[in-house]
Image (spheres, rainbow, N blue to C red):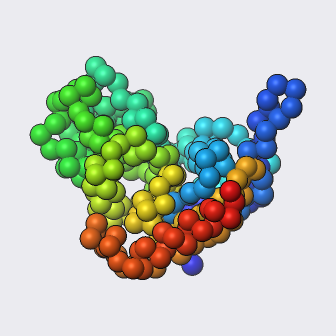
Amino acid sequence: MGQIIISVRNLGKIFPSGQSSIVALEHVNLDVTKNEFVSIVGPSGCGKTTLIRLIGDLIKPSSGKILVNGKSPEKARKDRDFGYVFQDPVLFPWRTVSQNIQLPKEVFNQKEESNRIKELIKLVVLSGFENSLPRELSAGMKSKVAIARALSYQPSVLLMDEPFGNIDELTRENLNAELLKIWESTKRTIVFVTHSIPEAVFLSDRIFVMTSRPGRIKSDVQVELERPRTLEMRKSSKYAMLVEEIREFLRENQ
């Protein structure tokens, strides 16, 4: 196993609910190594988004420990060790593509070099749209702007919470292929939350399968498919077997 970048130990999260409480996560344990692409799948409401939000220091755990690059999530966030891509791209409608991408640098009082912005725009295949406003972009293009923005300050980890969940299937497949090219080019560590089992199998080195609430890690599945991957690979029997294997793990939790 390579260098561990993310370590989660005995993680638990309880949300208050009126006079009672909801146990969202319980005894979650996992490791993610450097440059790995891992996905998290599980039944609806199992705590996938809660887990990635805890890693990203958007909420605090009720119990357990998380380390990102050997630091607490709060310290890792302040050190800009990770970028976060949300379900909604959350672009400012009055800012162009270039201006939305450079926003984190402005927040950190750093000037983004124009060449760097051009490189990021080229990386996410948006050359020619530098001066376009969000209303002029398709849903897939908006997602790519969000990815470029998250990469703008060169984090070592990219946390992605169902970034393509609201996009049509054909566009989503193309975005998956483009995301793998971005990952192969930047060699970031990626943690990717998705409801789509085929998507998780196509993208990932490993897949963490979660149980129903309270969410735990039921299985850690190694995706033994050759890289680089192509959309054509989805027709292979090995790919289909892995998709069915994950589905079976999930059926056991219905």
Q: Quadrant of the N terminus?
A: bottom right
Residue 158: image location, x then y, percent = 46, 52
Q: Quadrant of residue 221?
A: bottom right
Residue 131: give x, y in percent of width and height.
17, 30
Give x and y (percent) for residue 137: 23, 33
Instruction: Identify the residue shown where x is 79% and y is 44%.
Output: 23
Q: Is 64 displayed left or right of 241 in the figure?
A: right
Residue in front for this viewpoint, 136 or 191: 136
| Residue at the (56%, 57%) spot, across then down | 41
Task: Say whether residue 199 is left or right of residue 116.
Answer: right
**Position of 3 relative to 29 (above/below):** below
The residue lying furthest to the left in this view is 128
Q: Position of residue 234 (x, y in %)?
A: 34, 70
Numbered disc total: 0
Most distant residue in the top direction: 94
Return the residue nearer the eye: 151 or 172: 172
Q: Nearer the viewer, residue 138 or 34?
A: 138
Give the residue displayed 20% in from the left and 28% down from the top.
Answer: 136
Please give the name of the residue rendered at 35% of the width and 43% of the height, measured from the top-left corner: 167
Q: Could you tell me which quadrant the C terminus lies in? A: bottom right
Residue 120 visible? The answer is yes
Nearer-the-camera pick, 85 or 176: 176
